[in-house]
Image (cartoon, rainbow, N blue to C red):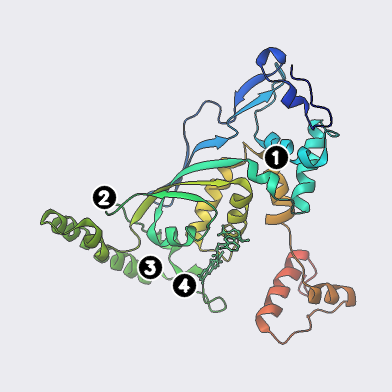
């Protein structure tokens, strides 16, 4: 046993430094080297590592090993040793999430191996807080894998949202679109042939379409993963990247169940209200005081979610 330093913050978990002090070490990934979810037609998100990977559980407790404890451990440096029980751990994590006390969530990290079409990688790479190492098209030939949406996933351009699509387009136009992709992919043979004739790979790839799959290792802390998920699970995000976000959430949820529950409750399925919206609710007005039609539409969406729309 290590004696706590006078005045220092030493939790019970720190005091148990060896198994003989009374704990079992368990792998949060249950001994798996890789947990993979297939996404789109050739893509995947695979969880390949986690920090903490090994966690202490009470011997014989049957407790599922979880990395939530690392959040609590970091937070207790701020809040002291006062709360120790599992129910209190849950309360503490939920408090941290509600009050945007974010740094304890950075103490957990996940490393993924992912494969996605290049046009999705371009959106994903904007999340700057991750560490990324991508397949090199300068060093190696790009594999012959292209994204083809299902006919149902070929969307019509939305009339209200310039950035998005909504319902499926008619089957004939969808087929025309898929044929257009196939024609673009015919460049692949020429790409390989040109590299064989000596054109450098870094230039030859310039004629390939952006539905070509790339892959990377992507490591990020839990705070920034949740930020990524909050943005990319949202219905305003492109359907294809939402599929990746769903896969990522499914992979981390069993490892940080309490943090993900809090994330769903306070962020993902929560709602932020503006001052104008709060005023409208207070005064019982169906509309907010603005001439901005987009803001009005967003408010009507929120009213629908709150169950206070007129067409209830
Ligand atoms: C629906 C949707 C539509 C989008 N449309 C477009 C578009 O049309 N054009 C476009 O260019 N982008 C677009 N984006 C990308 C968007 O603007 C962000 O770049 C992306 O979502 C990453 O968000 P982030 O910067 O918060 O995340 P991260 O880069 O992961 O950063 C996380 C947080 O860290 C902080 N941070 C990171 N780097 C800095 C820094 N250098 N300075 C200060 N703070 C920093 C910020 O608080 C940030 O929120 C879109 C994103 C979404 C979700």
Which residue corresponds to mark 4? 156
- Tell me: 194 left or right of 205: left
Q: Which mark is residue 274?
A: none
Q: Which mark is residue 174?
A: 3
Query: Marks 1 and 3, how far apart in space?
Result: 47 Å
Tell me the residue at 22%/58% (across/down): 188
Asked whether disc 4 touches disc 2, contact meaning CB atoms under 8 Å apart, the reply is no
Percent of width and height locating residue 45: 47, 45
Percent of width and height locating residue 100: 74, 54
Percent of width and height locating residue 159: 54, 79
Which residue corresponds to mark 2? 139
The local secondary structure at tag 2 comes to loop
Q: Residue furthest bottom?
A: 291
Quadrant occupied by the N terminus: top right
Q: Which mark is residue 71?
A: 1
- Depth check, mark 1 against mark 3: the one in front is 1
Q: Please indicate, yes or no, whether residue 186 appears anywhere in the rendered image.
A: no
State which tag comes first along the sequence, 2 or 3: 2
Q: Please indicate, yes or no, whether residue 231 appears anywhere in the rendered image.
A: yes
Query: Marks 2 and 3, how far apart in space?
Result: 35 Å
The local secondary structure at tag 1 comes to helix
121 and 102: which is toward the camera: 102
**Label 4, ligand 1: CB separation under 8 Å:** no
288 and 311: which is toward the camera: 288
Tell me the residue at 50%/52% (across/down): 244
């Amino acid at each position: 046993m290590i004696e706590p330093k006078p005045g220092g913050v030493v939790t019970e978990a720190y005091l148990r430094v060896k198994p003989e002090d009374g704990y079992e070490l368990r792998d949060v990934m249950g001994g798996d080297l890789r947990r993979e979810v297939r996404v789109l037609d050739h893509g995947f998100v695979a969880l390949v590592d986690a920090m903490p990977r090994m966690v202490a559980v009470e011997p014989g407790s049957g407790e599922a090993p979880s990395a939530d404890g690392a959040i609590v451990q970091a937070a207790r440096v701020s809040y002291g040793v006062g709360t120790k029980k599992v129910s209190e751990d849950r309360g503490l994590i939920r408090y941290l999430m509600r009050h945007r006390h974010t740094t304890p969530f950075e103490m957990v990290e996940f490393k993924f191996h992912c494969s996605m079409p290049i046009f999705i990688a371009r959106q994903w790479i904007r999340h700057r807080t991750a560490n990324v190492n991508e397949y090199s098209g300068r060093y190696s030939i790009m594999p012959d894998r292209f994204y083809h949406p299902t006919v149902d996933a070929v969307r019509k351009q939305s009339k209200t949202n310039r950035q998005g699509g909504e319902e499926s387009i008619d089957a004939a136009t969808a087929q025309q679109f898929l044929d257009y992709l196939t024609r673009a992919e015919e460049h692949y043979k020429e790409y390989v042939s040109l590299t064989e004739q000596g054109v450098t790979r870094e230039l030859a790839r310039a004629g390939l379409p952006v539905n070509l799959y790339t892959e990377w290792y992507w490591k990020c802390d839990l705070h920034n993963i949740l930020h990524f998920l909050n943005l990319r699970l949202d219905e305003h995000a492109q359907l294809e990247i939402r599929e990746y976000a769903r896969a990522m959430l499914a992979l981390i949820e069993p490892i940080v169940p309490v943090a993900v529950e809090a994330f769903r409750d306070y962020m993902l399925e929560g709602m932020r209200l503006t001052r104008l919206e709060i005023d409208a609710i207070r005064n019982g007005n169906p509309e907010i005081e603005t001439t901005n039609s987009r803001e009005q539409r967003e408010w009507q969406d929120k009213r629908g979610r709150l169950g206070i729309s007129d067409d209830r």
